[in-house]
Image: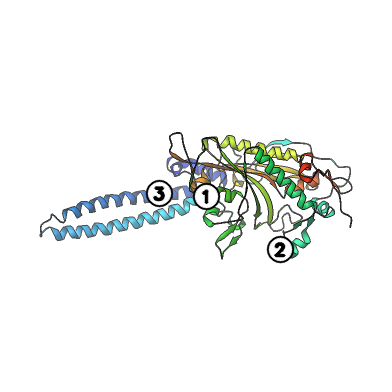
Amino acid sequence: MIDPRTLREDPEAVRASQRARGEDEGVVDKLLDLDQRRRSAIATADKLRAEQKSVSKQVPKASAEDKPALLARAKDLSAQVKAAEVEQNEASEEFDKLFRILPNLVHPDAPIGGEDDFAVLKTVGEVPSFDFAPRDHLDLMEGLGALDMERGAKVSGSRFYFLSGVGAQLQLALLNMAVARATANGFTPMITPSLVRPEIMAGTGFLGAHSSEVYRLRDDDLYLVGTSEVPLAGYHSDEILDLAAGPRRYAGWSSCYRREAGSYGKDTRGIIRVHQFDKVEMFVFAKPEDAEAEHERLLGWEEDMLAAIEVPYRVIDTATGDLGTSAYRKYDCEAWVPTQETYRELTSTSNCTTFQARRLSVRYRDDNGKPQTAATLNGTLATTRWIVAIVENHQQPDGSVRVPVALRPFLGGLEVLEPVKR
């Protein structure tokens, strides 16, 4: 959640952020009214308690003649205190419920608009020019014996798959390379739980507008994660971190599960949009004043990975209406997919400022030893979808695929993935 002081001291900034996101700005006035009701009820209850205490002290000393009136007054004050407390609790509950669904503020430089209103910050590499008709990733991977969508659907339903042979090896190589690079850059590698408690999922902001995307195990009251960002955000919940030496960085390897609600008919061919995939995610706890610089570093590490797999890509500044609930600013890296003749998202990195940490109570001590709310950031380092860009951009006329040089050591030195004989 945002800092409540921002709501009270600069409500226009919150209204502007809501407008930029395409959200209801009227919620700001509702919150201010509820906050005023709550604060007024607290003041009233405190005043009544003080008067009640004063009257109670007078009762033992009162004359027989005055005592009944004092007792009646004490009883009346007690009832008024209870009424004020009820008003306080009702206003607080309404405020907290509404405040928790208020999204993060947006960065003033983020482009305004919806999904298609992003700003292209840079384009890197030249799109490949083939002297043959390029095949899409599904045809290529089936030819390599790397992917089986039909049996995935038979076993689990649509948008599930089996990676087999070099397909499984390619994913492991890619994710191992991501972990190796993250470790070299000071990240602690983590293999994270796939199931989390409701308070952790809610704390990261995934049970608001995007709750339809999340798989829930109702019998156990647990949620399947769509990214290791969720368990990593909860890793230090209710803790005070030592950030004196700099940000705390983790690289989480996890299987990810997404319902893809509302995406029926989109990207149904192959593994671009699926219900389960693997990912290595960078996650950082930092001091708020260091967050923007750390965000740029995360983007740089993502670009280093994209350069390593030798694919053309572009970096976009995501528009305000397409930001997640928790994101203050988000950069996406999109790789060129030859058969679609367009760029498709491979990475995303978000600066969530103190939004998640405030909900999860993750703090650090400032220079004066006082606890302060930390900032959180996240960024993709590799996912199953990257295989699409690799095989399509590095395909050869016979259906084989050249392995990017940096990836070869993680594939046992293999230079070319050859089609299997059927």
Identity, as a three-letter code, of the amino acid under mark 1: Asp
- From this view, report whether residue 333 is shown above or below residue 278: above
Identity, as a three-letter code, of the amino acid under mark 2: Ser
The residue pinned by badge 2 equals 156
Which sits in the foreground, 10 or 355? 355
The residue pinned by badge 1 equals 24
**Image color mode:** rainbow
Q: CA distance from mark 3 to mark 1?
A: 18 Å
Does any portion of residue 341 appear in the rendered image? no
User: Disc 2 or 1, which lies upstream in sequence?
Assistant: 1
User: Disc 2 or 3, which lies upstream in sequence?
Assistant: 3
Q: Is residue 234 left or right of residue 41?
A: right
Q: Quadrant of residue 183?
A: top right
Residue drawn at (43%, 42%) of the image = 5
Give percent across and percent down for residue 352. Answer: 56, 43
Tell me, yes or no, whether the two marked residues, 2 and 3, touch with CB atoms within 8 Å. no
User: Disc 3 or 1, which lies upstream in sequence?
Assistant: 1
Tell me, for residue 35, which label it has, or none: 3
Give percent across and percent down for residue 366. Answer: 46, 36
Identity, as a three-letter code, of the amino acid under mark 3: Asp
Tell me, yes or no, whether the two marked residues, 2 and 1, touch with CB atoms within 8 Å. no
Q: Is residue 192 left or right of residue 368?
A: right
Which sits in the foreground, 255 or 176? 176
